[in-house]
Image (spheres, rainbow, N blue to C red):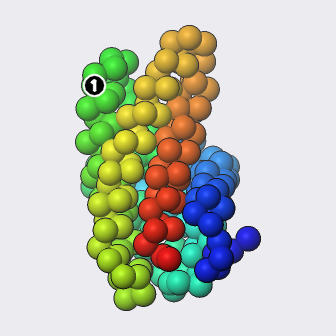
């Protein structure tokens, strides 16, 4: 199941997506989804660990996987500490579509940039053109967060259940996993 030179882009992306979304689902054991102030640095760090560890297993033949885990954990702690929030676990407190798109895009881009920059430090010596990962991460998160946020608010309005917002966050993770998985494959081959 791990990356080899014969692995296709589809199989790699599928494994990456399963690892990433699976990590998100596991993280829900420790992190209570809420608004920005509800998710602290310790919870974001645990969430980062839950995401980074399975990802590191997929790419361990190409990078120092322990470093990937450490820098990803530190990136999540950083974006939470600086006030951006644990983007993949927070629900916007606004109910208007344009503001959700604006804040989702903005916070997604900033969070994705910080995560990408941190992860770049783990891959820069072993991956050609690794600097692209910083922008891949930022763009992926800038697309995924508002997408999931809009799905979440639509489901919440339709069902009147907060679970709709949680489904929106899952959509965020699915989108970011697919976008980063496709591009991680391209960088690693």
Q: Secondary structure at mark 1?
A: helix
Q: Quadrant of the N terminus?
A: bottom right
> Is residue 156 placed above or below 102 in the rendered structure?
above
Q: Is residue 80 left or right of residue 69?
A: left
| On screen, residue 173 above or below 42 | above
User: Count the marks: how many?
Assistant: 1
Q: Nearer the viewer, residue 130 or 55?
A: 130
Q: x, y percentage for residue 112? A: 35, 55
**In front: 152, or 70?**
152
125 relative position to 158: left or right: left
Image location of residue 43, percent across then percent down:
51, 54
Q: Which residue is mark 1?
A: 99
Q: Residue at x 31, y 30 (%)?
A: 101
* Residue sitting nearer the eye, 137 or 72: 137
Residue 127: x and y in percent read: 41, 82
Please state which of residues 131 and 160 is positioned toward the viewer in this rendering.
131
Q: At x 34% / y 20%, what residue is drawn?
A: 97
- The residue sitting at 32% across, 51% down in the picture is 139
Task: Tell me what residue is drawn at x 55 percent, y 19 percent.
Answer: 155
Q: Is residue 50 above or below residue 6?
A: above
**Residue 180 visible in the shown view:** yes
Residue 106: x and y in percent read 26, 42
């Amino acid at each position: 199941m791990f990356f080899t030179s014969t692995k296709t882009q589809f199989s790699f992306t599928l494994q990456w997506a399963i690892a990433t979304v699976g990590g998100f689902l596991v993280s829900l054991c420790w992190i209570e989804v809420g608004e920005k102030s509800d998710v602290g640095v310790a919870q974001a760090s645990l969430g980062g660990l839950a995401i980074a560890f399975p990802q590191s297993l997929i790419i361990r033949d190409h990078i120092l996987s322990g470093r990937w885990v450490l820098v990803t954990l530190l990136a999540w702690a950083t974006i939470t500490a600086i006030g951006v929030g644990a983007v993949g676990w927070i629900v916007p407190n606004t109910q208007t579509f344009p503001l959700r798109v604006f804040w989702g895009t903005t916070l997604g881009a900033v969070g994705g940039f910080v995560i990408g920059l941190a992860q770049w430090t783990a891959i820069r010596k072993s991956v050609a053109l690794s600097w692209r990962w910083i922008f891949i991460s930022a763009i992926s998160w800038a697309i995924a967060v508002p997408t999931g946020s809009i799905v979440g608010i639509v489901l919440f309005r339709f069902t009147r259940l907060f679970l709709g917002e949680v489904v929106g966050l899952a959509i965020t993770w699915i989108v970011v996993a697919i976008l980063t998985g496709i591009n991680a494959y391209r960088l690693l081959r």
